[in-house]
Amino acid sequence: MKISTLAATVALLGCASAAQATNIEFWYGNTGPVETAIKAQCDAFNAAQSENHVNCVGQGSYEVSMQKAIAAYRAKNHPVLIQFFDAGTLD
């Protein structure tokens, strides 16, 4: 998933609810340089405006992220956005 796609999605969701602040939780399963880039993009987005906030939450490895997302969905406590690649969407 491109980081710019995250920013565009957040911007669209923010436009849909301009009357009130939007808090979006985004889970991702990356580590290393990719995680650093995701955090930087989230920080830049949050610093650029005050109406919307993206809370980027690293879940460790992709496999751990997938397990946590499935458990959160079953518990009806899942985040607004979760990063998966095509094979993971079947779950």
Image: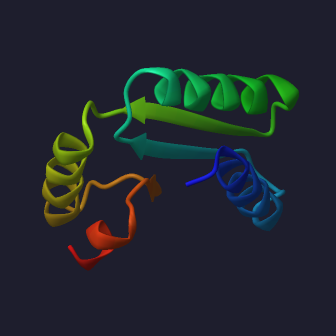
Residue 77 higher or lower than 49, as above or below: below
**Residue lying furthest front:** 33
Quadrant housing the N terminus? bottom right
Does residue 83 appear to the left or right of 77 in the view shown?
right
Residue 3 higher or lower than 1, as above or below: above
Taking the spot 70% from the left edge, 53% from the top edge, the residue there is 10
Residue 21 picture location, percent across and down: 72, 45
Quadrant housing the C terminus? bottom left
Residue 22 picture location, percent across and down: 67, 48
Residue 76 picture location, percent across and down: 23, 62
Taking the spot 85% from the left edge, 32% from the top edge, the residue there is 49
Does residue 77 appear to the left or right of 10 in the view shown?
left
Between 40 and 73, the residue placed more toward the observer is 40
Does residue 42 appear to the left or right of 85 in the view shown?
right
Between 81 and 19, the residue placed more toward the observer is 81
Q: How many marks?
A: 0
**Residue lying furthest bottom:** 90
Residue 2 higher or lower than 76, as above or below: above
Taking the spot 83% from the left edge, 57% from the top edge, the residue there is 18
